[in-house]
Amino acid sequence: MTKFMVRCKKKAIQELPNNKSGVYIIKNHNGTNMYAGVATRAKVQQQLETHFHDGEHYIPGAWIEFHQCQNITEANALLDKILAHQTPTYQ
């Protein structure tokens, strides 16, 4: 499993790998888990961009933590583990 940390900007999201499924966590400037979800292979950028309604910064100061997994089963298991320890502000 590979972990990436990028700013919550469209340009940064475009640079994330898209070849495997993964779990993404949107964190605010304090590191609080705001939202967590799973993105399937070949749809990582598309899934993350659903959080942008207008402009380049949907959540100013936010970060995206992305854990690339080997398959969707591993991604779903990781998401369950994350949610068991950290309840996101928005679900």
Image (cartoon, rainbow, N blue to C red):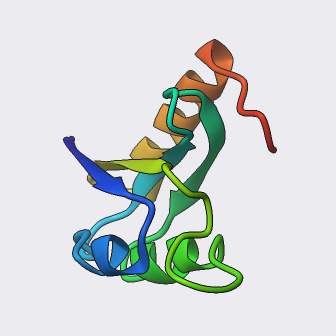
State which quarter of the image contains the N terminus: top left
- The answer to whether residue 85 is seen in the rendering is yes
- The answer to whether residue 69 is seen in the rendering is no
For the residue pair 31 and 24, the one nearer the viewer reads as 31
The x, y position of residue 20, in whole percent, is 29, 67
For the residue pair 26 and 86, the one nearer the viewer reads as 26
* Residue at the top extreme, as displayed: 85
Residue 17 occupies which quadrant of the picture?
A: bottom left
Q: Residue at x 42, y 79 (%)?
A: 10
43 w.r.t. 58: above or below:
below
Q: Residue at x 36, y 57 (%)?
A: 7
Q: Residue at x 32, y 80 (%)?
A: 11
State which quarter of the image contains the C terminus: top right
For the residue pair 35 and 83, the one nearer the viewer reads as 35
The x, y position of residue 24, in whole percent, is 47, 51
The x, y position of residue 89, in whole percent, is 77, 34
Residue 83 occupies which quadrant of the picture?
A: top right
9 w.r.t. 53: above or below:
above
Figure disc tally: 0
Indicate left or right for 18 with 34 as reference.
left
